[in-house]
Image: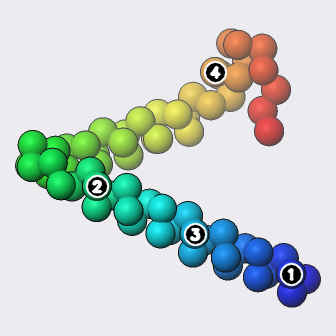
Amino acid sequence: MISYAVATIVSMVILTNIALKAINLITRFSAFERHIEMVTGVVILLVGVWMLTEEYIFEYFGVTPF
């Protein structure tokens, strides 16, 4: 149980650092930075649509969900 907890914490720290470095790289572009709120809204909208239609998409393509 301890090794699972340590592995989980380490992976969270690593993935968070990778995401932070990617965000810092992306926000260096001033054109992207001006529209960051719109991009965030579109991403949230797409995730919401995906969650609402997930079962339909799996059925349509004949793939079993996880």
First in sequence, mark 2 or 1: give its number: 1
User: Mark 4 and 1 residues: CB-CB less than 8 Å, in contact?
Assistant: no
**Tag 2: amino acid:** Leu
Q: CA distance from mark 2 to mark 1?
A: 33 Å
Label 3 packing within 10 angstroms: few (<14), some (14-19), many (20+): few
Residue sticking out furthest to the bottom: 2
Q: Dot 2 corresponds to which residue? A: 25
First in sequence, mark 3 or 2: give its number: 3
Rendered residue at 70%/13% (across/down): 61
Secondary structure beneath dot 1 equals helix
Q: Nearer the viewer, mark 2 or mark 4?
A: 2
Q: Quadrant of the N terminus?
A: bottom right
First in sequence, mark 4 or 3: give its number: 3
Q: Is residue 37 visible?
A: no
Q: Dot 4 corresponds to which residue? A: 57
Q: CA distance from mark 3 to mark 2?
A: 17 Å
Q: Nearer the viewer, mark 4 or mark 1?
A: 1
Q: Dot 3 corresponds to which residue? A: 14
Secondary structure beneath dot 4 equals helix
